[in-house]
Amino acid sequence: MDAASGRIAWRAYSTGPDRDVLIGARFKPFYESERGKDLGVSTWPPEAWKIGGGTVWGFVSYDPASNLIYYGTANPGPWNPEQRPGDNKWTAGVFARDPETGEAQWFYQLSAHDLHDYDGVNENIVLDLTIGGKPRKVIVHPDRNGYVYVLDRATGEVISATPFSHITTSSGVDLSTGRLRYEPKKEPKVGRVIRDICPASPGAKDWQPAAWSPRTRLLYIPHQNLCQDAETTQTSYIAGTPYVGADVKMKAGPGGYRGEFTAWDPAAGKKVWSIREDLPVWSGALVTAGDVAFYGTMDGWFKAVNARDGTPLWQFKTGSGIIGQPISYRGPDGKQYIAIMSGVGGWAGAVVAGGLDPRDGTGALGFVNAMKDLPQRTSKGGMLYVFALP
Amino acid sequence: MSSRCRDAFAIALVCACVWPSMANGAERVLRVCADPDNLPYSNRNGAGFENRIAEIIARELGTSVGYTWHPQLRGFVRKTLNEKLCDVLIGVPTDLELVRTTKPYYRSAYVFVYRAGERAFDSFDDERLMSARIGVQLVRNDLAATPPGHALAGRGITQNVVGFPVLGDGPQAERIVRAVADGTLDVAVAWGPPAAYYARLQTVPLAISAVRAAGEPSSLPFEFSLSMGVRRSDNELAQTLNGIIDRRQEELHAVLAEYGVPEVAPVPTDAKGEMP
């Protein structure tokens, strides 16, 4: 939108014909599978792109040097993938666009024909890294599908895609085609029970943003360790109509813990250290120039750790679970402050915030099953805590 | 919340106070939980076939029926039977894991509903389905939730399919069948008992034919056996009901036939209710 007048400057859709997606002469995707006319129509059953999802509910990054914006698109709809054969462009991927005209420069589909609700909306962090001895201008994207992607931000080439969480739904990313290699055994099929789908639908990491420290050259990723079972054989009965239910039940992943705070070296593509948390780490991360990293837990602890090695430095119990974003700022008095909103909610916290019945594990699309203990661990809230540094 | 639900909640509260438990009350009423407005199964006027079947069971037990009304939506078993507001559900799928089921007393199927005189539909491979306007029942917020929805989607038939949600202006099965009668749809694929019941009430003659499950590549069931349901701990009552089903099976079939319920042959594996 035009900041002065509020007039809509441009609007680009995530599905449909090229003119609606603002794909034109400038569009130069890196991979073959993203090239062709009107893929936002032809990679769907007839007309299905009209209800195809691909919403843009995450973050938009801007790189002044290349004058491009970057953002991710959500999963395709409906959930049942059998109803939408095809790649389902341009869902579950990353767009690079001209901020003035909206024209697409490139697109990369993280999860073609998404099977597991792996939205591609997570943040794209604009970084200059040295990879293999060469300087690379990249965006780093920790995706719901369990990989940290390092993409060339000029071209959309995948430089690396490395698992940061336990993954059973795919066996890696083919760097020659860019395609995620799905594990066929974990593909949801009506009438079949599929256990240990990892990551679960909220992904290895959902929307909760990671933080980058130019001092440690590490990315601090708040995330979860969840798997799910899709129980599709159980008979249900509603209003005199029998059918086979497709209920999902989420649970802790390997190790029995549900969350993790990971310090990740994106240049090397490896974990440097991590802290396991019993509950999903559903808060954002913050790292300061004092080499302190902050995050919150869903039972209300606000924690500070040493950004270099993860050593706990300090923690404070707030009144409710934390799913907010810690921020650091300098007050008018010249002092540094750290602020965090406490108040549990969201998909993971719905069992408390929505007052759901913890006995029905299929509530909140199956997330209640993994969070049955949360009502005993915390309660509803909504309070801003501000801490002054001494 | 619809007015239908609100009424049901109010009545549920009243009934819970009036009817004592079968186990400890001197009156030993047959306590049944049922939907107050879900023909042909049940309604609060006793006009459904499950009302009639409840009467048969009560007669066998030398007692009368006491109802707790509750809409048969998500949470029905948890909020009624498991809250001990009643002891028996008259009709549930035999393999419903939430309850202990008796032996099955009938088996029905999903059916195609279409205008009489047209060539019969009996398979999802019928080429007319590629272009026909097709109605399916929606039981969740997912178009493909009923087995016919899945079968159609599995064949790539997704764009000419219209979903009918449970809640709306009148019963779901009535809406979907009426849409066939008035030409809005060419064919509907709906669960047999309500589809057949409402098909008979239309002014336009309609035909029904059971979905043939054979030939479906997946393990999707299109036929379901129906039983009575009791709490999982209530084996004694289940055995009593099994005895009544044995003695009164012919009478039960006669009631179902009166309502036009399409019955299909029972399967040998339907023995769950007979296990101790």
Image: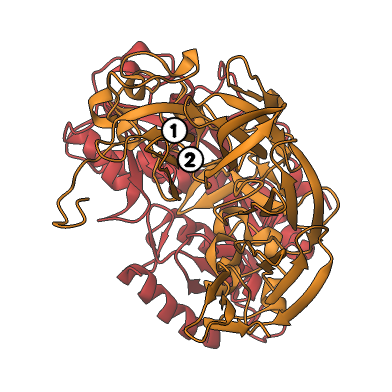
Chain colours: A orange, B red
**Badge 2 amino acid:** Ala
Q: Is residue A13 left or right of residue A111?
A: left
Q: Is residue A167 left or right of residue B15?
A: right
- From the viewer's perspective, is residue B226 above or below residue B58? above
A37 on left or right of A319: left
Q: Helix, strand or loop at disc 1?
A: helix
Q: Which three-letter amino acid code belongs to the residue tagged 1? A: Gly
Q: Position of residue A288 (x, y in %)?
A: 64, 65
| Horizontal and vertical percent position of residue A97 | 35, 34
CB within 8 Å, label 2 to label 1: yes
Q: Which residue is mark 2?
A: B145
Q: Which residue is mark 1?
A: B149
Q: Is residue B180 above or below residue B96?
A: above
Decide if residue A355 is in sight here: no
Q: Residues within 10 Å of mark 2 (few under 14, many from 20)?
A: many
Instruction: Establish if B224 lies above or below A18.
Output: below
State the residue at coordinates (44%, 20%).
A29
